[in-house]
Amino acid sequence: MSPSSSSSDPFRFLTATGPVAELTSARAWVGAILDVEAALAGAQADAGDIPLSAAGGIARACDVARVDVDAVVDEAAGGGNLVIPLLPRLQAIIGPEDAGYLHRAATSQDIVDAASAVVVQRGAGVVSTQLRRASQVAIDLEQAAGAAPMIARTLGQHAVPTTFATVTSRWCDGLAAAAGGLDRTARQRVWLGGPSGDGASFGPRRDEILRHFAQRLDLDVAPASRHAQRAWIADVAGAWGTAATACAKVALDVVVLAQDDIGEVTERSPGAGGSSSMPHKHNPIAAISARAAAMQVPGLVATLLTAAGSGEAERAAGAWHAEWPALHGLLRATGSAAHWVGESLRRLHVDQARMAANLARAQERR
């Protein structure tokens, strides 16, 4: 069996869960590349650079249902990216008359960078919505039990009295701020640089082609070449990393408050949270899963930041390639953390009586 022929990931329940999993699947990535190739041909036809009939044929060929995605992934190692094994397949579908107009004047980086922007943009809107929904659930918890008095805990010790609303308020603030950060990555930019990144290969109509290209992909036009300037990748890493951090904070609070010796909250969901050896246990498994997903993120962010600053000359050898699996993993892990933290909050039961008892005990000790 070839390495990519199985779509099974034994740990997808942690790091590829929720709607982000489908948006970042191999089919989604190859589909985004096909969308970009179709948009490029359409933009060149809009600018009068290639025949409209050729652009139409290319658009019809750029249908992910007509492509063997596993074969493209398997053969990508030969050229170092997904575009190279895809092009001959598309040319065969298009036919000899119009095949020469496919990928005209472009280089693989134009296509892969634009496809990455498309995937990020599609994912950002979905995960931002997940975070806002989780924040709303926290608001609902606050309305239901926010006035409940409880003991605050600082540096691992009992502190002074507070309320559950203080806890839910910080959850809401963190999740809402994280959603806002993702919203900023939901408007991505695109560039057409050609082999050396300066756009010269597209000729005098380059700016017009670029404008139509961006419009067709619902992206904005970048003000300058992005082949060697990778700050945009660092921006994505920062926003998505921050979102994972917000999820991790909520999840950790739930895990702490759900401990048996505290017991102020519990996750309630039939069939979830059981133990293989201790039937008395009821683990806050959604919060645990959110933490596990979020813990993948710092290393991925570090890889993206390192790669973004390590590109030599006009196009990087290795640093650019290192971005793809790290970006892929970042989107999936952060999206999974958002999914699981929302599940945790939806399952949450607040034990106000236990909060009152813990508070009374803490005050007796003072």
Image (cartoon, rainbow, N blue to C red):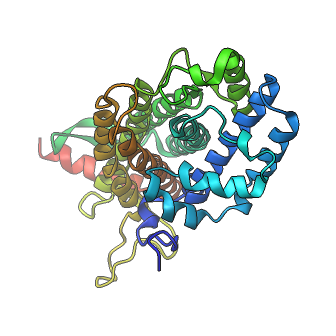
Residue 349 in sight from this viewpoint = no
Residue 230 coordinates in the image, percent (x, y) = 40, 27
Quick one: which residue is furthest to the left in this view?
366
The residue nearer to you, when weighing 238 against 200, is: 200
Question: Image quadrant for the C terminus?
Answer: top left
- Specify whether 320 is left or right of 110: left
The residue nearer to you, when weighing 363 against 270, is: 270
Determine the residue positioned at 36% across, 34% down.
Answer: 316
Residue 69 in sight from this viewpoint = yes
- Specify whether 42 is left or right of 365: right
- Quarter of the image where one finds residue 203: top right
- Quarter of the image where one finds residue 3: bottom left
The residue nearer to you, when weighing 358 against 340, is: 340
- Specify whether 196 is left or right of 91: left
Residue 168 coordinates in the image, percent (x, y) = 43, 39
Residue 75 vertical position relative to residue 337 in the rendered view, above or below: below
Residue 296 vertical position relative to residue 234 in the rendered view, above or below: below
Quick one: which residue is furthest to the right in this view?
53
Residue 223 vertical position relative to residue 240 in the rendered view, above or below: above
Determine the residue positioned at 62% across, 46% down.
Answer: 33
